[in-house]
Image: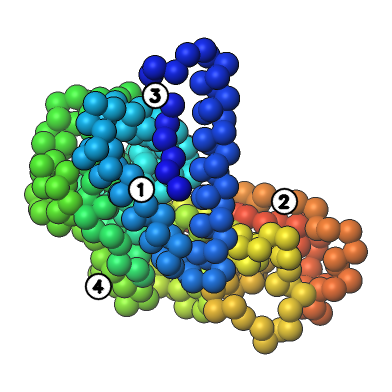
Amino acid sequence: MALYLPCTSMRGKTLELLKIRIRNAILTGIANAVHLLGRRTLGKTGFFTDLLHVGLQEWIRVYKEHFPNRISDLDRSYSLLRSELTGDFNWMFGPCRVRAVADQLRQVLHPISSGDEITFLDLGCGTHNPLGLSSVMYLNGARRAIALDLHEPDRPRSAVALYDLLVECWTNWEKWNWGGTDESTLQDRLARFHLDELKNGQMEEGITDVPISHYVGDILDAPFPEGSIDIMTSHLVLEHFLNFRDAMYTLFHLTAPGGLGAHWIDLSDHRRYLDPGRYHHWSFLAEDDNWSDGRCNRLRAGEIRQICETVGFEVVRFDCTRIDMPPGFGSRLTQRYRAMSPDDLSTVSVLAVLRRPNNR
């Protein structure tokens, strides 16, 4: 089945709009089918996903080889796709997502820390654009930035993602500057990145001359000295520590006296992301006390705060997002959760800003 974008010779805006809508409906249907079949039957990188990738490559090849006079159709496709992706927070590779995460962190840190001349740790940096947030922190004055994740990234693609981000920082610096970095410092720091290497997919070579490090491994075994991290952040990571108390002890000892951690924590049942028709935020609270999906610790907000304080952190902020549970679901909760307050049970996410006291 061949899919073609409407060419410039088509007459009538109504006809072209209709064809665009039909094309979009077809592509959306194919994307949904690939997503469903790829995830449920063959995994994220299953046969159908690969088939779609090969199909797109073949479509481009056919155009280049057999329709060189219509190569502008590919330009139009690329322009449409890029404009849609670059402005979408959900596009994991794009600068838009990095800026949104960086802005969240800036808003949290601005009243309590400048972010200058600090050692920064991005805990759970992800595999899509793992160096993005660390690079933004470095450009805004951090002395050193560290990105850590359990999983290996696609290094060539990560390098290109960082290249795109740095070009965006250069051309639209007013959107990325936290107010303390002058233009000469920006130019100097940007010049230390090797953009040609990044553009060609060479991640390590692209950051050789900047104080940014990437580690693959567990924070519990990380090779960082005690008290070496001034600012630490994580997004949707801490809920995955099954031994949460030990993890928080580790984070406490890695944090410098007076240092800060800003952590966004998702308290919902992660099964709902794959099967929202069957699961909701609280589904796993009705499972047996010994149940585990191996991914989420099922801690509630009050338990998280108590553990953070027990290991020694001062809680600077503890913002809870709450949603009412489905009617009648409270009767299905296991005994442990039935004893908790309605506020604790309705909390589905937390922003915890933690400080290690200067005297500890």
Residue at point 37%, 52% (across, down): 55
Viewer-side label of 4, 1:
1
Give the amino acid type for the residue marked by disc 3 in the picture. Answer: Cys
Give the amino acid type for the residue marked by disc 4 in the picture. Answer: Pro
Dot 3 corresponds to which residue?
Answer: 7
Give the amino acid type for the residue marked by disc 1 in the picture. Answer: Leu
Residue 223: numbered disc: 4
Residue at point 14%, 47% (across, down): 200
Q: CA distance from mark 4 to mark 1?
A: 43 Å
Q: Earlier in the sequence, mark 4 or mark 3?
A: 3
Give the amino acid type for the residue marked by disc 2 in the picture. Answer: Arg
Dot 2 corresponds to which residue?
Answer: 322
Dot 1 corresponds to which residue?
Answer: 56
- In the picture, measured across the screen, residue 66 lies left or right of residue 5, that is left
Q: CA distance from mark 4 to mark 3?
A: 57 Å
Viewer-side label of 1, 2:
1
Q: Are marks 4 and 1 in contact (CB under 8 Å)?
A: no
Q: For residue 360, say whether it is visible.
A: no
Q: CA distance from mark 4 to mark 2?
A: 37 Å
